[in-house]
């Protein structure tokens, strides 16, 4: 936990993958927001030598698989425990923080599987947070398991006093767990995309065999090829969400991994 001293009510940022990303956000604060106050950062991480423990992330950050046959597949053997993790770890931590400190705003941040966890929290625990920063969420996981069966349910968020930020790199992986650059190129109408000045869309797609992702865990590779299809792309999801509460950010020239810092910055600045 990192607390910037303040006499005012605190803004609390709950972040997933803190083992890797806590140092990133602290360096970001030192470089860009040295006078930032009223902020508490609460990080959730996993034990082990790896910055991103893929096995634990697959288990704790992913939603329950709705397709029973898919849930039995080896690739999903230990997956789908996001609600258990939320109830046993995240929720008690939130209650403890709010009972001890006066809080003005609660934000949850996650990237990739962490972003998927944030979406799950948005749909199932809306009242718990004021801001949801879902960075490059793995939408295709479990054939879009995180999405409501009835997408019209997303309209219920229009009456909530929340802010939703969806982010991704301009260059993401074609047919992967997010959506291809082609989806971005084809996006014409609907929600305005917040881009850096003079940002241009690109149809360049990274080869799936030439990524910076850790592919050592075979289960992580397998779910990308089995049961990895979302009914919505990121753009389409953004358009389904209340437009007055949603911001969709695309980071120029960034891929899945290199967009993390930009996404963290959006959690602090938006």
Image (cartoon, rainbow, N blue to C red):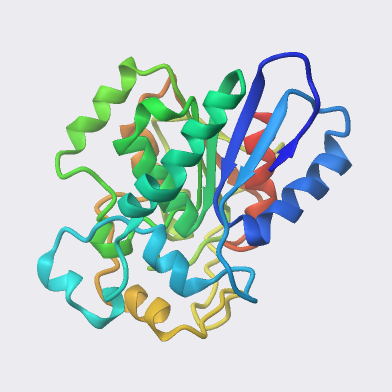
Figure quadrant of residue 177: bottom left
Is residue 190 or residue 102 the one in the foreground? 102
* Image location (x, y in percent) of residue 205: 52, 68
**In which quadrant is the C terminus drawn?**
top right
* Image location (x, y in percent) of residue 4: 79, 31
Query: In the rendered image of this protein, does residue 215 appear above or below residue 30?
Result: below
Query: In the rendered image of this protein, does residue 203 appear above or below residue 39?
Result: below
Figure quadrant of residue 204: bottom right
Is residue 148 rendered to the left or right of residue 128? left
Query: In the rendered image of this protein, does residue 162 appear above or below residue 125?
Result: above
Is residue 26 or residue 148 the one in the foreground? 26
Asked if one can make out residue 187 in the rendered structure from this viewpoint, the answer is no
Query: In the rendered image of this protein, does residue 35 appear above or below residue 259?
Result: above
* Image location (x, y in percent) of residue 87: 35, 45
Figure quadrant of residue 65: bottom left
Q: Residue at x 61, y 63 (%)?
A: 257
Is residue 142 rendered to the left or right of residue 14? left
Is residue 205 or residue 249 the one in the foreground? 249
Is residue 165 or residue 58 the one in the foreground? 58
* Image location (x, y in percent) of residue 6: 79, 20
Number of marks: 0
Is residue 199 rendered to the left or right of residue 77? right
Q: Residue at x 68, y 33 (%)?
A: 40
């Amino acid at each position: 936990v990192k607390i910037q001293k303040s006499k005012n009510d605190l803004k609390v940022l709950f972040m997933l993958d803190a083992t890797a990303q806590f140092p990133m956000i602290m360096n970001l604060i030192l470089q860009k927001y040295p006078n930032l106050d009223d902020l508490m950062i609460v990080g959730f991480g996993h034990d082990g030598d790896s910055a991103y423990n893929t096995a634990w992330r697959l288990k704790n950050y992913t939603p329950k698989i709705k397709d029973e046959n898919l849930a039995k597949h080896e690739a999903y053997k230990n997956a789908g425990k996001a609600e258990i993790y939320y109830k046993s770890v995240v929720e008690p931590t939130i209650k403890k923080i709010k009972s001890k400190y006066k809080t003005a705003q609660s934000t949850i941040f996650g990237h990739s599987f962490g972003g998927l966890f944030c979406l799950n929290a948005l749909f199932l625990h809306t009242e718990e947070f004021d801001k949801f920063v879902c960075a490059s969420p793995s939408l295709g996981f479990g054939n879009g398991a995180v999405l409501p069966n009835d997408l019209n349910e997303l309209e219920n968020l229009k009456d909530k006093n929340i802010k939703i930020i969806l982010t991704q790199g301009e260059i993401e992986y074609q047919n992967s767990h997010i959506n291809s650059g082609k989806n971005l190129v084809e996006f014409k109408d609907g929600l305005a995309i917040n881009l850096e000045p003079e940002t241009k869309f690109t149809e360049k797609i990274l080869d799936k065999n030439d990524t910076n992702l850790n592919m050592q865990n075979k289960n992580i590779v397998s779910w990308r090829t089995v049961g990895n299809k979302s009914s919505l792309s990121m753009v389409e999801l953004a358009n389904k969400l209340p437009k007055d509460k949603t911001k969709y950010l695309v980071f120029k020239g960034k891929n899945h991994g290199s967009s993390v810092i930009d996404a963290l910055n959006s959690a602090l600045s938006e």
